[in-house]
Amino acid sequence: QVQLVESGGGLVQLGGSLRLSCAASGRLFRINEMGWYRQAPGKQRELVASITREMVTSYADSAKGRFTISRDNAKNTGYLQMNSLESDDTAVYYCNARVLTITLTLVDSWGQGTQVTVSS
């Protein structure tokens, strides 16, 4: 019913920046909360940052001061600006959205993931 497509991942040098995007489409009426998660090899998926429809943001300690989450409600798109990237930021990043569909059903949607690799 709802599709999330991430883009913007890739290979970046230590200290560099990347901007991830997450575009939602499908039978959606409204996107409530959006979030970015990541999963490194051998580790559990963890929440990096989240943002409500009212633009209230929350960050993991590891992301504070370096990452900025934002969204454009008119475009049904979310973003994660990542600066001062560190080796520990290497992971697959997933977009998550809690969506109210046009049938007024709440669904929890995930993107396919985008690889971020920080090289030293």
Image (cartoon, rainbow, N blue to C red):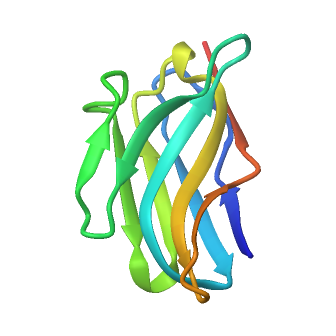
Quadrant in which residue 92 is drawn:
top right
Q: Nearer the viewer, residue 17 or 45?
A: 45
Horizontal and vertical percent position of residue 32: 41, 68
In percent of the image, x 59 and y 25: which residue is there?
13
Q: Quadrant of the N terminus?
A: bottom right
Whether residue 54 is visible: yes
Q: Nearer the viewer, residue 16 or 43?
A: 43
In screen coordinates, is 57 left or right of 34? left
Horizontal and vertical percent position of residue 76: 51, 77
In percent of the image, x 59 and y 51: which residue is there?
95
Horizontal and vertical percent position of residue 56: 23, 57
Q: Is residue 58 above or below residue 118?
A: below
Q: Quadrant of the C terminus?
A: top right
Horizontal and vertical percent position of residue 24: 62, 72
Quadrant in which residue 107 is drawn:
bottom right
In screen coordinates, is 53 left or right of 12? left
Number of labels in the image equals 0
In percent of the image, x 71 and y 63: which residue is there?
5
In screen coordinates, is 44 left or right of 54? right
Whether residue 117 is visible: no
Quadrant in which residue 51 is drawn:
bottom left
In percent of the image, x 43 and y 48: which residue is there?
81
